C-alpha cells in the first residue's frame, strides 16, 4: 500500500517538471502527507494538462458521505477494471500524483515495532505515482463539490519486496501523455502500464519513528537513523 508520502517540492517546479499549467492553490510543504490531506495532482481537464490539488481518498459520485474516502486512499492495480468505485475513473479520469518519496514500515527480526523506511529515487527526482480522480457532489448541500483521488498500487518489485509486498504504481515519462489522456479508454493498453517499477528506480533508508505521528511534518523526518537505536526508543505505531 501507500499510506504516507513526501511532497515538499514547490508547485511551480512540479508544474515545470510535468509540463503542466501551474496551480493557484499552494499547499504547505509536507514530509508526512497522510490520507485525507489535500495533495498535488497532474491531470488533463478541458484539454489542458495542469497541476491542481485533490483530496487524498477517492469519493465515488454515489457516496452519501465524504468519510468513505478514508477507505479508498489506494486502489489495487489488479482489480481497477472490476471495482465499481474505480472502473469509471480508470477509463477516463486518470492522474499523476507527484511525490518526493514515500514511507513504508518494515518488520525487523526480534523487534516488536516496525521500522519506518523512506523510499525515494536515487537521482532525487520526483516519483510520478499513477492515480485516479473523481468528482463528488453533495445531494444535501447544493454547490458542495469535492475532487478526490486515489493512488494505484502494484505488487512490489524485488528491491521493495523485503520491506512490503505492495508499492505505488510509478509511471515513466514516456507513458505520462497516454495515461493522462481521457480520450484513451483502451483498458487492455492501460493495463500494460500497471506493472512494478524497475528496481533501480528506488533506494531507501531507515528514518525516525516520529513519522508515525501524522502531526509531524518537518524535513528531519527523512533523515537516516540507525535502526537499532530507533527500535530501542520507539513506542508508537503509525497514526
Image (cartoon, rainbow, N blue to C red):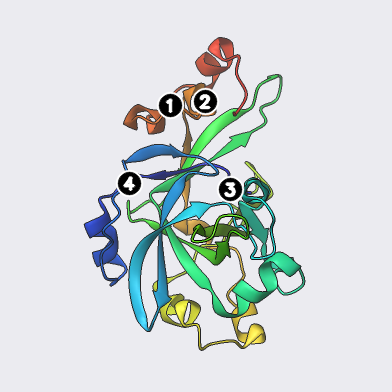
In the rendered image, residue 187, in percent from the top left (x then y), is placed at: 65, 83
Please give left or right for residue 236 compared with residue 19 in the image.
right
Please give left or right for residue 105 compared with residue 129 in the image.
right
Say which mark, if any, is on residue 2: 3
Which residue is the site of mark 1?
216
In the rendered image, residue 87, in percent from the top left (x then y), is placed at: 69, 73
Which residue is depicted at the point 50% across and 83% down? 182
Q: CA distance from mark 3 to mark 1?
A: 18 Å
Comparing labels 4 and 3, the label whose residue is closer to the camera:
4
Please give left or right for residue 83 compared with residue 119 in the image.
right
Residue 185 position (above or below residue 28): below
Which residue is depicted at the point 39% across and 33% down? 222
Which residue is the site of mark 4?
27
Near mark 3 (Cα within 10 A), the count class, few <14, some 14-19 or many ≥20, is many
Near mark 2 (Cα within 10 A), the count class, few <14, some 14-19 or many ≥20, is some
Comparing labels 4 and 1, the label whose residue is closer to the camera:
4
Tags 2 and 1 touching, CB below 8 Å: yes
Q: Earlier in the sequence, mark 3 or mark 2?
A: 3
Q: CA distance from mark 4 to mark 3?
A: 20 Å
Q: CA distance from mark 4 to mark 1?
A: 16 Å
SS for tag 3?
loop
Amino acid at each position: 500500500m501507500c499510506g504516507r508520502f513526501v511532497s515538499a517540492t514547490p508547485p511551480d517546479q512540479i508544474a515545470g517538471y510535468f509540463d503542466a499549467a501551474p496551480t493557484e492553490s499552494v499547499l504547505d510543504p509536507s514530509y508526512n502527507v497522510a490520507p485525507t490531506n489535500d495533495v498535488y495532482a497532474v491531470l488533463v481537464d478541458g484539454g489542458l494538462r495542469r497541476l491542481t490539488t485533490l483530496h487524498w481518498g477517492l469519493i465515488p459520485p454515489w457516496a452519501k458521505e465524504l468519510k468513505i474516502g478514508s477507505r479508498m486512499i489506494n486502489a489495487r492495480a489488479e482489480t481497477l477494471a472490476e471495482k465499481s468505485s474505480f472502473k469509471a475513473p480508470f477509463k477516463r479520469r486518470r492522474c499523476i500524483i507527484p511525490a518526493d518519496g514515500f514511507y513504508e514500515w518494515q518488520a525487523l527480526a526480534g523487534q516488536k515495532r516496525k521500522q519506518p523506511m523512506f523510499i525515494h529515487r536515487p537521482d532525487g527526482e520526483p516519483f510520478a505515482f499513477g492515480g485516479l480522480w473523481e468528482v463528488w457532489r453533495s445531494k444535501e448541500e447544493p454547490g458542495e463539490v469535492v475532487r478526490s483521488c486515489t493512488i494505484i498500487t502494484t505488487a512490489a518489485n524485488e528491491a521493495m519486496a523485503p520491506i512490503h509486498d505492495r508499492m505505488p504504481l510509478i509511471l515513466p515519462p514516456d507513458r505520462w501523455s497516454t495515461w493522462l489522456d481521457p480520450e484513451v479508454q483502451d483498458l487492455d493498453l492501460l493495463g500494460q502500464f500497471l506493472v512494478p517499477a524497475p528496481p533501480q528506480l528506488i533506494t531507501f533508508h531507515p528514518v525516525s519513528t516520529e513519522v508515525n505521528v501524522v502531526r509531524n511534518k518537518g524535513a528531519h523526518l527523512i533523515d537516516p537513523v540507525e535502526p537499532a537505536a530507533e527500535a530501542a526508543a520507539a513506542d508508537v505505531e503509525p497514526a
